[in-house]
Image (cartoon, rainbow, N blue to C red):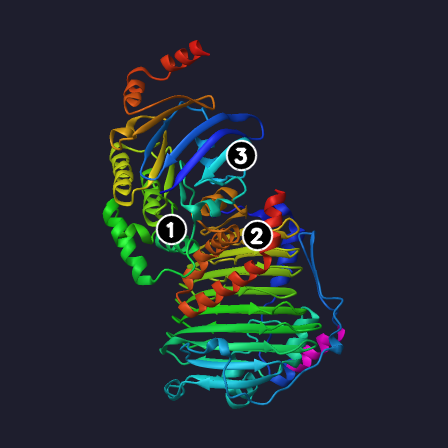
């Protein structure tokens, strides 16, 4: 059981403040969705959780099982059990998917994983996620289509078995088949490994395939509304404008 | 149609003249060894130590070297091959330590089938006809003092002859070692691949951590007769000591012959290599790969020449280099298509990666085309470490140095995998890995400063 707790998080980049007091808690086994329009700070939150050097935390805390993450390097956060599926995964030229996975697994262990054990885990993961085995001998993200990149992200998540995963707009740029594969992959990992996930999205489509228990709406760097799945339906019907008006009226 | 940018015409005739001078009259007329040594000795006596300028802003100078103080060190035979070859299959091994060939082994069945692997000194005496037919056919002996010194004073040396039609899957391995500082090693390798033969040849230039100035002045020549095929690799790592390596390598590709050539330049205080591959027969084809990694205050100066003397011919030149520390590296690549070499098609690309703010890395591609039914072009990229890629890998649990290593290895990997030779690939990967580990701190500083 792990818990990612974000308290009153303020984050800025070189030119402006993007997050202005975010509170959010995600535990193992929980599925959260974070929705928000473009520019609301969603990717900033994802990158800040993992320690991207381009974002400066000016106030607040990010705690993992009570431990402050702010001073930890990204790889140390990964080793604690956090994972980030990227919106735009970058190519790792010259390194096959399988070799990269083995490196990443070994980076989190004292003893390198046995070849046989790794092979078995990889076989299991590709079957679970319905990925072609030959996919793993291609260079990671090098010349991959949008769908293949996202599939590679989910495959990494399956192999690294994080406690809590942040999926940053994993659904963007996907056709409906790829979207379904990715969403079902997340649902399967949730069911099989009991991971907790924070699914960050601009659209609601992915939520047709993976059902979050908790839904948060981020606008202008603040979480302005929280609820259950019914909030997704409302957004689908009405869009963000009525919510903006509502919070405007309350403010 | 030439799709090349004839840069030289733009750059003006002075530059073209310089390049032509570098290539001028490749080859030394056939003569007995004593005569060529005598001529080289005369050249040595009147030539100055070399100083090369490239494009007016790059200088490689050996003028501070005191050649007279260096020793020619001789050694007795050594029964055991170098440790790093243990567990590898070899067709034959020849080791020269400083001035002496100390170890030769050749598989018995290959000797029976006419393969010759011996010191070049022995070849000059015992296989004089072969020796004289090929020796210095494409190499000059008088362009600068160190070239003259090599031709005048070489000792030991390596001679390889593979008779026509013979296929040898395991590699021949020629190793030049410098055992201690203060040494002069004048080296010469002559290799001949008979018509239709197929072989692998690796040449190594190696030293540990030596103390004081040393010189390796080497000449290498490989002749591929009609239809011969060769995979040639040269691995140079002179260690952190003060080794000055000024060498010329020449590969001649005959009719319908093919060569895959990869120099891996992995260390040396000052390395100046003139590496030239010439397609001399119609239908000749080649892949000329190269990689280098410079560190600390190393100075590397590569002149790689892709020469087409006749067509139809093919060429594919692809080099990659990384520089760390305060090192300086210059890669000059020249495509030259001679008059009448119609239907020659070749491409030159060079990719670089800068790992330190104090390092310098320059690429100077040139194309000289003397025929109209050809294609010759060049391209390349200049890169630094991609911070987004490092962050991506860190989120997978890799430390920053691990991520940098993956990136740099991945940068070289497209060339390394093409070697199609597992032990050699491992050796090169390990050496690059070790260099990165040594440069980790300073790479980190560079990243933080950006």
Q: Which residue is mark 1?
A: A139
In the depicted structure, whether residue A109 falls above or below residue B252? above
User: Left of B347 or right of it: where is A32?
Assistant: left
State the residue position of label 3.
A55
Q: Nearer the viewer, residue B49 or A65?
A: A65
- Identify the secondary structure beneath mark 2: strand
Number of marks in the image? 3
Image height check: is B195 above or below A8? below
Residue marked by disc 2: B366
Query: Crowdedness of circle 1 by 10 Å Cα count: few (<14), some, many (20+)?
Result: many
Q: Quadrant of the N terminus of chain A?
A: top left
SS at badge 3: loop
User: B100 and B342: which one is in front?
Assistant: B100
| Residue at image coords 58%, 30% | A14
Q: Does label 2 lie on the same chain as label 3?
A: no
**Residue B253 visible within the image:** no
Q: CA distance from mark 2 to mark 1?
A: 32 Å
Q: Is residue B195 above or below residue B376?
A: below
């Amino acid at each position: 059981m792990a818990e990612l707790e974000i308290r009153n998080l303020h984050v800025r980049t070189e030119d402006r403040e993007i997050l202005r007091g975010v509170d959010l808690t995600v535990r193992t086994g929980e599925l959260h969705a974070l929705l928000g329009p473009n520019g609301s700070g969603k990717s900033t939150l994802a990158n800040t959780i993992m320690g991207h050097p381009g974002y400066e935390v000016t106030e607040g805390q990010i705690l993992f099982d009570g431990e402050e993450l702010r001073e930890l390097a990204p790889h140390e956060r990964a080793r604690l059990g956090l994972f980030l599926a990227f919106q735009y995964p970058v190519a790792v030229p010259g390194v096959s998917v399988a070799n990269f996975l083995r490196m990443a697994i070994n980076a989190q262990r004292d003893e390198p994983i046995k070849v046989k054990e790794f092979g078995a885990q990889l076989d299991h993961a590709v079957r679970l996620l319905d990925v072609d085995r030959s996919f793993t001998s291609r260079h990671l993200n090098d010349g991959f289509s949008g769908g293949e990149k996202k599939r590679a992200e989910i495959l990494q998540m399956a192999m690294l078995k994080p406690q809590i995963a942040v999926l940053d707009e994993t659904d963007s740029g996907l056709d409906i088949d790829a979207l379904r594969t990715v969403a079902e992959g997340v649902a399967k990992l949730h069911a099989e490994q009991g991971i907790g996930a924070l699914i960050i999205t601009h659209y609601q489509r992915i939520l047709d395939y993976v059902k979050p228990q908790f839904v948060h709406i981020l606008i202008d760097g603040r979480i302005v509304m929280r609820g259950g799945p019914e909030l997704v339906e409302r957004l689908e019907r009405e869009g963000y404008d009525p919510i903006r008006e509502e919070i405007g009226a309350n403010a | 149609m030439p799709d090349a940018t004839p840069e030289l015409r733009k750059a003006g005739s002075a530059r073209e003249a310089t390049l032509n001078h570098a290539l001028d009259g490749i080859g030394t007329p056939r003569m007995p060894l004593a005569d060529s040594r005598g001529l080289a000795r005369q050249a040595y006596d009147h030539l100055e130590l070399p100083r090369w300028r490239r494009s007016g802003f790059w200088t490689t100078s050996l003028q501070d070297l005191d050649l007279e103080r260096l020793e020619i060190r001789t050694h007795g035979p050594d029964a055991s091959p170098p440790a790093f070859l243990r567990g590898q299959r070899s067709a034959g091994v020849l080791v020269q330590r400083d001035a002496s060939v100390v170890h030769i082994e050749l598989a018995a069945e290959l000797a029976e089938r006419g393969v010759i692997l011996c010191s070049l000194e022995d070849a000059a005496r015992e296989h004089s006809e072969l020796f004289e037919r090929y020796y210095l056919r494409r190499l000059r002996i008088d362009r600068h003092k160190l070239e003259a010194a090599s031709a005048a004073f070489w000792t030991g040396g390596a001679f390889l002859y593979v008779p026509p039609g013979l296929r040898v899957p395991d590699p021949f391995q020629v190793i030049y070692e410098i055992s201690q500082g203060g040494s002069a090693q004048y080296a010469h390798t002559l290799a001949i691949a008979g018509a239709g033969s197929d072989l692998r040849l690796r040449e190594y230039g190696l030293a540990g951590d030596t103390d004081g100035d040393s010189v390796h002045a080497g000449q290498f020549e490989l002749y591929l007769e009609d239809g011969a095929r060769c995979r040639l690799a040269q691995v140079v790592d002179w260690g952190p000591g003060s080794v000055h390596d000024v060498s010329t390598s020449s590969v001649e590709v005959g009719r319908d012959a093919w060569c895959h050539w990869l120099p891996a330049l992995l260390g040396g205080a000052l390395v100046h290599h003139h590496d030239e591959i010439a397609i001399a027969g119609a239908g000749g084809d080649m892949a000329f790969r190269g990689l280098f990694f410079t560190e600390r205050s190393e100075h590397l100066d590569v002149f790689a020449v892709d020469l087409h003397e006749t067509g139809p011919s093919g060429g594919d030149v692809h080099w990659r280099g990384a520089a760390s520390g305060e090192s300086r590296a210059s890669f000059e690549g020249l495509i030259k298509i001679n008059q009448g070499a119609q239907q020659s098609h070749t491409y030159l690309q060079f990719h670089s990666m800068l790992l330190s703010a104090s390092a310098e890395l320059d690429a100077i591609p040139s194309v000289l085309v003397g025929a109209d039914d050809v294609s010759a072009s060049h391209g390349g990229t200049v890169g630094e470490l991609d911070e987004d890629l490092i962050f991506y890998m860190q989120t997978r649990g890799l430390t920053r140095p691990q991520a940098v290593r993956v990136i740099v290895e991945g940068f070289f990997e497209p060339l390394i995998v093409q070697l199609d030779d597992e032990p050699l690939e491992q050796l090169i990967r390990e050496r690059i890995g070790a260099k990165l580990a040594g440069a980790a701190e300073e790479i980190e500083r560079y990243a933080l400063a950006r």
